[in-house]
Image (cartoon, coloured by chain):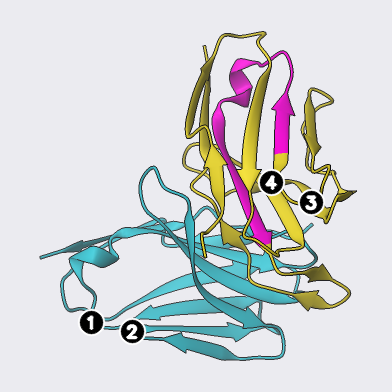
């Protein structure tokens, strides 16, 4: 059974820092991996989608990498801002449904 | 165009009541998913539709949960005889298509927060 783990569960950084969020999964047979952002009381906002044939995707200050063989993905956030404060969820797609981790709650202080 | 919309945004039900949650996917999206998110947890898959066909309902926790998408657009998740453990946020997502080795980005709605008293 596919399991997704995100470390750390919570992270606090000062504004301007570069940071890395980690996601690991137990079964490397995935079709894609998607990173989401969730603000309190809100739905999920898709940040980046990496297909299994890709190794990374970039959008603005965000860069996500995928290493299927080791079952790992990282989300790199450059020059963090207070507006980046949210919970970040990693999800893998071994099939049609996504399997999610529990998320990393990020707090960026000004 | 508009994103995925869900209604109601909040629902309070007394234990034993039936509830119906609605999802309007992005226009033209073939695939529709329902997820359940408990407090402090990641979303968990409930069921999946491709057009009007329910292709996977393996995540529905009990036979009190029922979902339909009769015309291949709007979907309704119905929970009968609600229990306190049903309290959660119910998220709907849609994608252009899924399956046959084509897996597109899923776009999520704002969710319906269900509280069962």
Do the residues at discs 4 and 3 belong to one chain?
A: yes
Alpha carbon separation for disc pair 4 and 2: 30 Å
Do the residues at discs 1 and 2 belong to one chain?
A: yes
* Of the two numbered discs 1 and 3 in the rendering, the one whose residue sits closer to the viewer: 3
Disc number placed over residue A61 in the picture, else none: 2
Instruction: Provide residue A104's location: percent of width, then percent of height.
Output: 42, 59
* Of the two numbered discs 2 and 3 in the rendering, the one whose residue sits closer to the viewer: 3
Q: Quadrant of the C terminus of chain A?
A: bottom left
Do the residues at discs 1 and 3 belong to one chain?
A: no
Alpha carbon separation for disc pair 1 and 2: 7 Å
Disc number placed over residue B48 in the picture, else none: 3
- Name the side, left or right, on which B107 lies relative to B31: left
- Specify whether residue B90 is painted magenta: yes
Q: Quadrant of the N terminus of chain A?
A: bottom right
Provide the residue designation for mark 4.
B34
Callouts 4 and 2 close, C-beta under 8 Å = no
Chain letter for the yellow colouring in the rendering: B
| Among the two numbered marks 4 and 3 on one chain, the one whose residue lies closer to the N terminus | 4
Q: Which of the pair B51/A78 is nearer the observer? A: B51
């Amino acid at each position: 059974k596919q399991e997704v783990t995100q470390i750390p569960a919570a992270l606090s950084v000062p504004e301007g820092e570069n940071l890395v969020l980690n996601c690991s999964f137990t079964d490397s047979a995935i079709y894609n991996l998607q990173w989401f952002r969730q603000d309190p009381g809100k739905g999920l906002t898709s940040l980046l989608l990496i297909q299994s044939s890709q190794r990374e995707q970039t959008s603005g200050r965000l860069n996500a990498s995928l290493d299927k063989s080791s079952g790992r993905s990282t989300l790199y956030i450059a020059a963090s801002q207070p507006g980046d404060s949210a919970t970040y969820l990693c999800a893998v797609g071994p099939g049609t449904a996504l399997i999610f981790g529990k998320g990393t709650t990020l707090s960026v202080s000004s | 165009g508009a994103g995925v919309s869900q209604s109601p945004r909040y629902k309070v039900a007394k234990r034993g009541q039936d509830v119906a949650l609605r999802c309007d996917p992005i226009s033209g999206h073939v695939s529709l998913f329902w997820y359940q998110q408990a407090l402090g947890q990641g979303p968990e898959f409930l069921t999946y539709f491709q057009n009007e066909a329910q292709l996977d309902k393996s995540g529905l926790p009990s036979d009190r949960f029922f979902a339909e998408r009769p015309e291949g657009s709007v979907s309704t998740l119905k929970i009968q005889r609600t229990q306190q453990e049903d309290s959660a946020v119910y998220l709907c997502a849609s994608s252009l298509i899924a399956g046959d080795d084509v897996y597109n980005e899923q776009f999520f709605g704002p969710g319906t927060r269900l509280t069962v008293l």
